[in-house]
Structures are given as C-alpha cells and as structure tokens.
Amino acid sequence: MKRSMLAAMTLSLLATPAVAQWVNHKTPGIPRTKDGNPNLTAPAPRTADGKPDLSGLWAINGLGHATNLADADMLPQAQALYKKRLETYANDDPAANCLPEGPRSGLAGLDPLRIIQTRYLTAVLYEAGQFRLIHTDGRALPKEMTPTWMGYSIGRWEGDTFVVETAGYNDRTWLDFGGRPHSEALRVTERFRRIDFGHMQLEMTFEDPKTYRRPITIKMAINFVPDDELIENVCLENEKDRARLVGKVADERKDEGKIPVNVLSQYAGTYDVGPLGNWTVSVVGDQLVVDLGTGGGRQPMFARADDVFMLQSSGGTVTFVRDAKNIVTHLVITIVEGDFKAERKTK
C-alpha cells in the first residue's frame, strides 16, 4: 500500500525489468528486421475490410495526464472536492480501495493493455483485470444506462481513425490520480489512429457539463509492446491498508520555510528519470514546480528543507544533490520503497 499514487506509479515503472515477461516467446506475425528485432516502423496492418487493425499489446506513453489533468476548468462544487482530495493525500482514491479505474484506465502507462479487434466488437483488456467492450455493429448509445465503472462504449470508423464514444459511467471513479472528479453525465470520446506498426496516436475528450465548464482534450502516444504479454495483476492489500492513509498536506507545510529565488533557480533544469522520461524543474514566482513532460502541466513542490521538496499532488520527496563544486548534478526521488536517482541533463 502506498501513501501516494505517484509513489506507486514511480515504483512500478522503475522496478519493471528491461526484458520481456515472456523471454522465450516472440510475438508471431509481426514484421522484423534482418537481425530479428521488431520492425516498429513497418506499415500498419489492415483487416480484411481494409480498416487499420489495432489489435495487439500496447502501452500509453505518458505519466503527466494521469497525475495532473491540465486545463480542467472545474465548477465550484467539483473544485472543492478536488481540493479536499489533494489535502488528504487522495485517501479515497478508487485504487486505494481496489476498485476499477474507470475512464483513467491505462492513462499512466504503467501496465500494458491488449486490444482485440473484430468486425462487430473490439475488446480492450487491462492488466488489472478490467475490460471494455466497444460495439461496432452500428448501434447507438442507449438512451438510459445503468451507471457502471467502465461505462458503455460504441465505435465507428472515420477514415483510418477509430472513434469511440463512452457514457454511462458512475461517479465513483476519478479522471486522474490527482483526484479530479466527474459526474454520471461524463461522456468520453476517444480517437485512435495507428500511424505505423509500432505507433498509435490517441486523443481523448472529456465532456461533463455538471463538473467542468468546458470539455478537456488530451493527446497521447501509444507504443506497441512486442514479445510480451499481459500478466495477472490482482489488488489484494489496498483495502486492508487503507486506514494508514491519514494526515493532511497542511500538516506537512506547517514548518515550511521560504527558500530564496536565487537558491531555487539553482535546481532548475531537465532531469532524466529513466522510464518516466524527462522531468523539467523550473521556478514560477517564488515556488519550485516540476513538469513531468507528458502534457500534465506543472505541479508545485513545497520545501521541507533548502534542498528537499515534496510534490503537493503525491507526497513523494525530491532531494537535489550537489557535487564538490556546489553544482546540482542530480535529484533523488524518495518513496517508501527506496531512493531513485535522476541525473541532471541540462540547466
């Protein structure tokens, strides 16, 4: 059980081995180069009726949207709920209760998802056990739907773009790991476009007039995962350990000191966080912020010491490390499982 969802996600990516889960079995039917490696820039496959075939194992390339859905103009009631979740370390997160992820499923890119495409039905399987059925037989969304965790989906083709509309969600899931809420009026439109064998583009639009003043649109890259497969991922301990998610961010900030801007500016730069990509640290006003680099916007950090900061949206700790010449060379992300080093690439 993790106190912060970012800590959980960070650990999952940093702890994932570089080799495939099924090391002795290559995915059949995929194009390969002369040396046997997957040719991910080969043309996208097509089905018998000429449509792009989206089938395969995929991973969304990104973390920012999952932790911080930017450009979300919330109505007052939703803003109050979101603020409460930020202040209490997201202790009512569906994941903390072993509940389905709903519309944010797969957004963190931590676990792969499998798409199985047939003529009249496309299935999306998630490693955590949830699944979606996208009906492509020409039906419309039902006028009345019993709210569910994953919603009700229909799909259609617009040229080479697969357009999916989903409605009928319950209001117990979140749009991101930061805690942005939604109502049962939520409607999600996804646009999948496979540009070659190994790469796909995804655009998602969230419309919920009871929660947001305007629709939210995000864009992500999705990468094919060759020579691998879904593995069983069962949530067992979160429900039992949920009682440990206590405290408020305000308690952590009681003794926060103001760090001079000239000191904060010494930490600015781009840091290589390995599988999590590049994080960009900068100074906005008199505060240090971090951009996870995948469209999620800047996230504030507050000072625990001159060189130690906490991410407000997660509770993860970031420590900046200097060399003998007093120059910042890297940062260390600290979560309950240990420390993870990120080298500084640029100033």
Image (cartoon, helix red, strand yellow):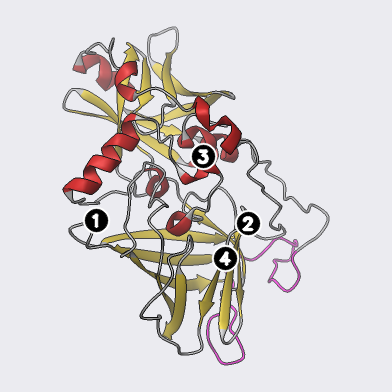
Residue 249 position by quadrant:
top left
Residue shown at the point (34%, 17%) measured from the top left: 252
Report the disc number at residue 129.
2
- In three-dimensional space, the C-alpha distance between marks 1 and 4, rounded to whole angstroms, equals 36 Å
Disc 2 to disc 4, C-alpha distance: 24 Å
What residue lies at 42% left-to-right and 48% top-to-bottom? 66
Q: Are marks 1 and 2 in contact (CB under 8 Å)?
A: no
Q: Nearer the viewer, residue 185 or 320?
A: 185
Q: Mark 3 points at which residue?
A: 96
Q: Distance between the residues labelled 3 and 2?
A: 16 Å
Say what secondary structure mark 2 lies in.
loop
- Helix or strand or loop: what does disc 1 sit on? loop
Q: Identify residue for label 1.
A: 211
Label of residue 198 in the image: 4
Extreme residue in the top direction = 324
**Residue drawn at x 16%, y 27% as measured from the top left:** 285
